[in-house]
Amino acid sequence: MSKGKIQKFHPKFVGRLILQYNSEYMEQKKRSLTLAALILITALFVSIPFFRLTFFAFTALQSDSEADSQTDPHNAKVIEIHKGENQNEIAKALAQSQTISNWKDFIWLGRLTRQWRRVKAGEYQISSTMTPIEIFSVLTSGISIVHPVTVREGENIYEIADDLTAKGLATRSHFLFLCQNHEFIQTLGLSESQNPPPHLTSLEGYVFPDTYFFDRSMTDSEIIKQMVKHFFAFWGKKEEDQARQLGLTRHQIITLASIIEKETGAPEERALISSVFHNRLKKGMKLQSDPTTIYGIWDRYQGKIHKSDLATKNPYNTYTIRALPIGPIANPGQDAIHAALFPADSPFLYFVSHNDGTHQFSRSFEEHNRAVQKFQLDPLARAGKSWRDHLKQPASVVSSGAGTVDSGSKNLKSQQYPPQSLQQPKKDHLPSVPDPKFPKRHSPNLYR
């Protein structure tokens, strides 16, 4: 055996090999421990926020017992999510409303659970007793708070716009702009094949009276479309055929119905009122209806009309034109539309108020003058029957020509308080100054 080979097994050489091996082993072990520590730290770094986020997700800001023990009425919150709002805006709004404890955690919770893409615009009611997971379930449900809006028979688009604006559901100027915008009106299917007008200039008459439920995420155009859709749910082929038999277009029928709606609040009189207008139209007589005059000066009307207003020429004033107005003056209900389509068979050309919600009908001008003398010019006939006297009565029970009206009844659709024909005094008995309580519904005109 050679000397070089013997040196490989020398004790000193072997010792060096062992030391080198031990050194490499320790270095490898050190690296392994470092890696394990890094893995452990990373795991802790990940798991602690995970467990923290899990705790956040299923923990309400306030327990039910805490909420019950407090008299704070703000436990229930209403949050409105607008189209286009981002995660930060929504989460911060929730934190400001004190329904979540940490808006950043709420953002991360939504990202991890992929809820943000499912959040829908709307108005939602949430509470500090709800967990963030429960809050997300509400925001993604699309079940928004709805607000009831009642369009009453005889209201015009200006009054409807005011009501919607007061409820925060529409912008008055934009709502009215759409109601009078030809291009928008064309999208609603209101064009007529039979003798159509050049174009419909307003949606007046087609915003159908009913009770609607709107949420704040709806646009003005969506609200209008829903109202007009209700009109078409009523107006169908039967109504179209009847209008054709009368020689009138749908637009003319709705215009006439709007005048009937404004002229009487007594359901049993609508067909007779309709017959008066049909008879006058056939004879080429002026309709001479005060409500048409008032609508023509609506922008400056202050609760009183003057003789000069009756003489003012405009497309709505039936004191100056021998025809129907250019369009409806209000939005009639189905009963008024039915009356316009099916007038009573009568010889009457005039009517005058009994001062109790009903009217005296006359065939001739002489007969009408006698009725005016009896019911309007005789102070005894008017005593205790004026609209002011009715306003002084208790709100629970009001006497009208149609019977006794209970204000607690659910059926006040036709008999309103005050009765529609009493909601505005005659033009010879109008208040001298605008009355804030003076309603914008008008009584029948004295045909003079």
Image: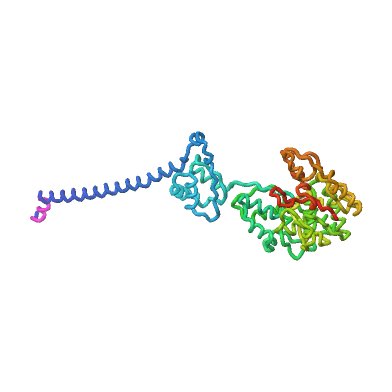
- Please identify the dominant SS of the magenta region: helix
Count numbered badges in the picture.
0
Q: Position of residue 134 (x, y in %)?
A: 51, 43
Residue closest to the eye, 422 or 255: 422
Q: Is residue 183 left or right of residue 334?
A: left
Query: What is the magenta range?
Result: 3-10
Q: Is residue 186 left or right of residue 261?
A: left
Specify the quadrant that holds the N terminus. bottom left
Decide if residue 269 is in sight here. Answer: yes
Does the magenta-highlighted stretch encompass residue 356? no
Return the residue found at the far left: 3
How is the structure coloured here?
Answer: rainbow
In the rendered image, which quarter is residue 203 located in?
A: bottom right
Residue 379 vertical position relative to residue 250 in the rendered view, above or below? above
Q: Position of residue 296 (x, y in %)?
A: 75, 59
Q: Position of residue 415 (x, y in %)?
A: 77, 44
Who's the residue at 83% across and 55% down the image? 242
Residue closest to the eye, 98 or 259: 259
Does the magenta-highlighted stretch encompass residue 4? yes
In the rendered image, which quarter is residue 50 located in?
A: top left
Residue 187 vertical position relative to residue 234 in the rendered view, above or below? below
Return the residue found at the far bottom: 198
Residue closest to the eye, 394 or 243: 394
Residue closest to the eye, 373 or 261: 373
Specify the quadrant that holds the C terminus. bottom right
Who's the residue at 89% across and 52% down the image? 369
Decide if residue 268 is in sight here. Answer: no
Q: Is residue 146 left or right of residue 129?
A: right
